Image (cartoon, grey):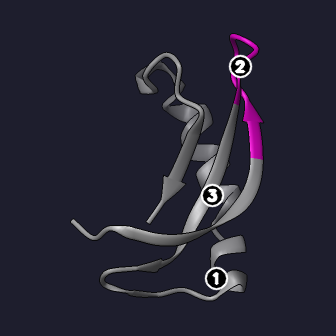
Amino acid sequence: MSKIISKKLLGSVLTSTGKSVSISAATRTTNGVRTDAAAESMKEALEAAIEKNERVIPQGTAEICTR
């Protein structure tokens, strides 16, 4: 699995339990580079995935970063 070297903060989502979770996208990993625009384009899909799968997010999670 690649390691995240840098990332772009995309915002945050509020879970059904009222917790705020930061969301971000990797812009540089050990496997490659993604532009900020490409990272930003992932925001809606990441928000939807979190909403759909909220029950599997470990309690206490502060940030979710997509590679």
Q: Which residue is mark 1?
A: 38
Q: Is residue 33 left or right of residue 23?
A: left
Q: Position of residue 30 (x, y in %)?
A: 32, 80
Report how far apart the C-alphas of labels 3 and 2 lie in the structure: 16 Å
Determine the secondary structure under disc 3: strand
Residue 5 at what x, y percent from top left? 45, 73
At 32% across and 67% down in the image, what residue appears? 3
> Residue 31: within the magenta?
no
Image quarter where the N terminus lies is: bottom left
Q: Which residues are magenta?
A: 12-20
Q: CA distance from mark 1 to mark 3?
A: 12 Å
Which tag, 1 or 3, sits closer to the chain's start?
A: 3
Question: Sequence order check: which comes first, mark 3 or mark 2?
Answer: 2
Residue 60 as seen in the image, left or right of residue 16: left
Binning the other alpha carbons within 10 Å of mark 3 as few (below 14), some (14 to 19) or many (20 upward) gives: many
Residue type indicated by callout 3: Ser
Nearest the eye: 13 or 53: 13
Residue under numbered circle 3: 24
- The secondary structure type at the circle numbered 1 is helix
Nearest to N terminus: mark 1 or mark 2: 2
Q: Residues within 10 Å of mark 1 (few under 14, many from 20)?
A: few
